[in-house]
Image (tube, helix red, strand yellow):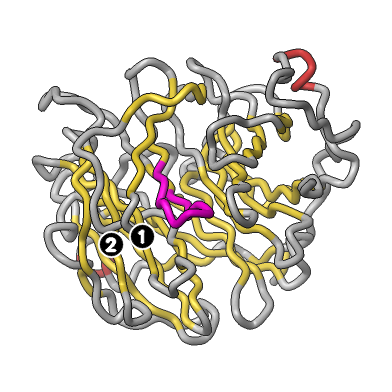
Amino acid sequence: MKRSLFTVFTLLSLSTFVGADDPLGPAEEAQAKDARDVIHTIFQGQSPDKLVCDTTLRALPDGSWVMVMLGGGDKEPSPRNRIFLTRSLDQGRTWSEMQPIDFGVKKNDPNRALVPTELMVHGERCTLFFTTHDGRFGEARTWQAHSNDSCRTWSAMTPVPDPLHKASFIRNHIVTRDGRIMLPFQFYVGERFPHNPRNGVMISEDDGKTWSVHGWIRLTDNDKYRGWAENNIVELADGTISMLIRADNLGGVLYRADSHDGGKTWPDFATKTDIPNPGSKATLYPLGGDRVAILHNPHPKQRNPLSLWISDDGMQTWPYRRVLVDSPGRLNYPDGFVSPDKEFLHFAFDDNRHRAVYVGAKLPAAD
């Protein structure tokens, strides 16, 4: 049965574009909203299962949209954590009841937790990447499962390639201009999150049948470092694969690593950017050539506001900056897709870990 949703608020005012030498200040940025943006609640959590995290919105081959998320229990990590899916047949206006997906994991061990990390839609096939753990981020294993009917039924789960089957998260895929699938990974040495992370990519040249692993990027030479190194990648106009990485407690900014040979080799260490980040997931969206959008929290200490920035020069500068949501509290884990006409960026985020929200953000026209 469908639940009718309500519009929480419409984000108003005018979209703002400024030159690279005239960046928006905090007060100006907070006013830069667009009357064509829309926002709806997808799910409102309630104890003892109010958790909403790792929200991921995707458009599927059959025309429907789905949002998958981490839920179950009131917090993470927890043995109650599991994967949930909801579907919209009207482009985000209404959503089905949440349905759990656990591939038999909970039947075999009710205390085994599941965390979704990427839903890859490639052609007619959907692939869900997810990680299981002991409810305390220990004994972590990483899996994939496939659907050929737009996430209505699933294959049995299978492990991702070693060494990434242990203590890894797989993040948002891209398809390069030469047709390869590329998935960034975050791997944790010691098999317990979030200890001593490494970053890199998985690459497939045969539509996901086989994978090779490339890169072992560090944020620091401190083997005792603990931090969630959530990453995203984008292909730039010259073929460079650029990765931005969350870097907890390392200066309040995102880190960056570039591969200049199509993702095959990477530097040993990522370097600091000047993009503020409090230690939260940011997501990248290619808009053609060197034009790239980022959804993120542009603040060194707090997950607020949630903003859209756009670069036209391969992420060197970000002249377009617009606050999308600045309601109180923590605005976490934005993830979605760009409409085929590049008019809107559709995404979901979690509002204070207990509400899943859909946003359709109007994109500015390219020069």
Q: Secondary structure at mark 1?
A: strand
Q: Is residue 170 magenta?
A: no
- Please indicate, yes or no, whether residue 136 appears anywhere in the rendered image: no
Taking 349 as reference, is 180 above or below it?
Answer: below
Q: Label for residue 202?
A: 2
* Percent position of residue 4, x then y: 79, 60
Q: Which quadrant holds residue 60?
A: bottom right
Which residue is found at the position 54% from the left and 25% from the top? 303
Is residue 229 left or right of 69 when viewed as pictured? left
- Please indicate, yes or no, whether residue 126 appears anywhere in the rendered image: yes
Q: Residue furthest front?
A: 238
Tag 1: amino acid: Leu
How packed mark 1 is, by other alpha carbons closer than 10 Å (few <14, some 14-19, many 20 or more), is many
Q: Label for residue 118?
A: none
Earlier-in-chain disc, 1 versus 2 = 1
Taking 267 as reference, is 81 above or below it?
Answer: below
In this view of the protein, which residue sits in the foreground, 262 or 203? 262
* Percent position of residue 83, x then y: 42, 59
* Percent position of residue 7, x then y: 83, 47
Is residue 322 left or right of 154 when viewed as pictured? right
> In the picture, which quadrant includes the N terminus?
bottom right
Magenta region: which residues? 233-243
Q: Which residue is mark 1?
A: 183
* Percent position of residue 158, x then y: 23, 74
Q: Are marks 1 and 2 in contact (CB under 8 Å)?
A: yes
In this view of the protein, which residue sits in the foreground, 67 or 20? 20
- For the image, the number of numbered tags is 2
Tag 2: amino acid: Met
Q: Which quadrant holds residue 117?
A: bottom left
Taking 105 as reference, is 19 above or below it?
Answer: above
Is residue 24 left or right of 100 when viewed as pictured? right
Which residue is found at the position 28% from the left and 75% from the top? 157
